[in-house]
């Protein structure tokens, strides 16, 4: 069960918000720094009453073989067996 609502207000307490990585529904797969900064930026907008920005349509270019080839050359994989 969540401790905070969608605006990061603590259930059952008036005027208290939690703005840190403890409100993430699941733990990110990497460093917590960037997601926590993004959460803090969003929370600052919530506190100030600002709405989300409108999404922009941006053209994205992809190489035709992007799924099978990321870099030139063959991957080097060294497996150490002990």
Image: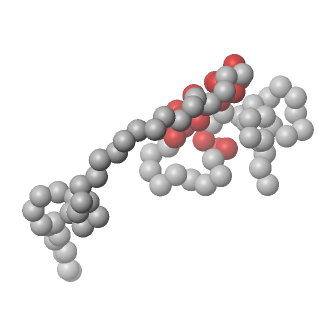
Residue 40 visible, this orientation: no
Q: What is the residue that sits farthest to the top in this orientation? A: 48
- 27 versus 11 height, above or below: below
Q: What is the residue that sits farthest to the bottom in this orientation? A: 82
* In front of the other: 62 or 6: 62
Residue at horizontal 61 percent and vertical 55 percent from the top: 26
* In front of the other: 47 or 18: 47
- 3 versus 81 height, above or below: above
Residue 5 visible, this orientation: yes
- In this rendering, position of residue 7 left or right of residue 57: right
Quadrant (top left/top right/bottom left/bottom right) for the N terminus: bottom right
- 72 versus 15 height, above or below: below
- In this rendering, position of residue 53 left or right of residue 67: right
Res 76 quadrant in image: bottom left
Residue at horizontal 87 percent and vertical 29 percent from the top: 14
Residue at horizontal 52 percent and vertical 40 percent from the top: 35
Return the x and y of residue 23 as percentages of the image width and height.
67, 44
Return the x and y of residue 53 as percentages of the image width and height.
58, 29
* In front of the other: 20 or 75: 75
* In front of the other: 2 or 50: 50
How does the figure colour the protein chain or chains?
Answer: secondary structure
Quadrant (top left/top right/bottom left/bottom right) for the C terminus: bottom left
Residue at horizontal 88 percent and vertical 33 percent from the top: 13
Q: What is the residue that sits farthest to the left in this orientation? A: 73
Res 77 quadrant in image: bottom left
- In this rendering, position of residue 6 left or right of residue 37: right
Res 18 quadrant in image: top right
């Amino acid at each position: 069960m969540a401790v905070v609502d969608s605006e990061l207000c603590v259930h059952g307490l008036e005027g208290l918000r939690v703005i840190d990585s403890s409100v993430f529904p699941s733990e990110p797969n990497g460093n917590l720094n960037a997601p926590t900064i993004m959460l803090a930026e969003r929370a600052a907008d919530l506190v100030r009453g600002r709405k989300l920005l409108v999404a922009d349509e941006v053209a994205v270019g992809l190489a035709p073989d992007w799924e099978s080839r990321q870099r030139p050359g063959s991957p080097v994989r060294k497996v150490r067996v002990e």
